[in-house]
Image (tube, rainbow, N blue to C red):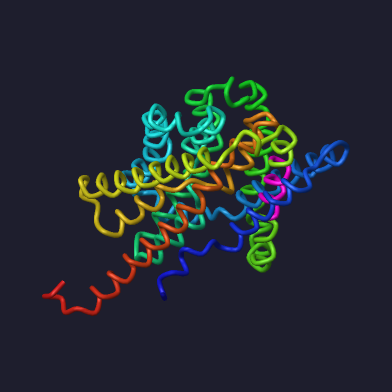
Amino acid sequence: MPRLPFLIPDRFTLSLVGTVVLASVMPCRGEAAVAVNALTNVAVGLLFFLHGAKLSREAVLAGATHWRLHALVLASTFILFPLLGLAFKPLFSPLVSPALYAGVLFLCTLPSTVQSSIAFTSIARGNVPAAVCAASASSLIGIFVTPALVGIVVDSQSAAVRSPWHTVGNIVAQLLVPFVAGQLLRPVVAPWLDRHRRALRFVDQGSILLVVYMAFSEAINEGLWHHLGLRTLAGLVVADGALLGAALLITGWVGKRLRFDRADRITIVFCGSKKSLASGIPMAKVIFSSQAIGIAVLPLMLFHQMQLMVCAALAQRWGDRAARAETLPVDAR
């Protein structure tokens, strides 16, 4: 029983589910939708400003010299995942709709998480400075790489992807400019952010919930639930589970074959097998047309909860194992 709590969704996941239910019952329409969409654009800009302002240059530089580890994490995030998504397409396409599998492929192009990758690495007694650097680099590089990968692996007709020039312009205006502004103003705003860290967490999560509400309102207005049955959702669970399982197994195996030590292998697994909901949902708003966002982010929302549950269990297990090893005599280790 003490090990069951990792199966219980966290509060933010429950909030996401509640937001989807709210959008299903009370979708935003008409002039209200125009106002909420404008507010959502401001929220996305604020979210990436905070990402830039919270990214510590010192912490990144502390682990930046470990280039082999970072190269492997980036290769897993931006090469392995898209290849897995394309390889699994013939297998799982019969189980899900083309638009929904486009969301799976979009998930494969996203950067790694930052906070949870670092947290799980710490719990499992991994290389935390390297995790900070690898996850932060992935988040920054993803601003440029994800839209390019979407253009390569996602069928624009099945997913209603915006034109490349429109996407680049929105990426720069809504994501990159606020991020750079946050980095430049970090020396000024960092002390204030540190003092109000708990309150700003609601800003982060509130921004994502607002984007989810707007996205699913658009999808509901387009008849989302009429196109998704239980069989399709079950197929999505299988597809997401296969992606996560393959990523965990491959990153662990490759890290061992390349003779990384235990702490580095833990960092590679947690940073190389996870996808960022915080970056993914705002990016979906920029990349996909409004009526396609809801179905595009559904695979990501499911994958988010699955990766938290599985990685929490792994982190706890590996952390307990490391703690037991530390209590043994040197000769017995």
Q: Is residue 283 magenta?
A: no
Q: Percent x, y for residue 154?
A: 51, 26
Query: Which residue is nearer to you in this view: 297 or 175?
Result: 297
Q: Is residue 260 left or right of residue 204?
A: left
Location of the C terminus by quadrant is bottom left
Query: Residue most toward the right?
Result: 31
Q: Residue at x 39, y 60 (%)?
A: 121
> Residue 280, located in which quarter of the rendered image?
top right
Q: Residue at x 64, y 46 (%)?
A: 48
Q: Percent x, y for residue 332?
A: 13, 75
Q: Residue at x 40, y 66 (%)?
A: 123
> Residue 322, located in which quarter of the rendered image?
bottom left
Q: Percent x, y for residue 299?
A: 53, 41
Regarding residue 241, the answer to whether it shows in the image is yes
Q: Percent x, y for residue 62?
A: 42, 56
Query: Which residue is nearer to you in this view: 157 or 166?
Result: 157
Magenta stretch bounds = 206-215
Vertical order, 140 against 101 (above or below): below
> Residue 2, located in which quarter of the rendered image?
bottom left
Q: Residue at x 75, y 48 (%)?
A: 25
> Which secondary structure class fits the magenta region best?
helix
Vertical order, 45 against 187 (above or below): above
Query: Which residue is nearer to you in this view: 42 or 208?
Result: 208
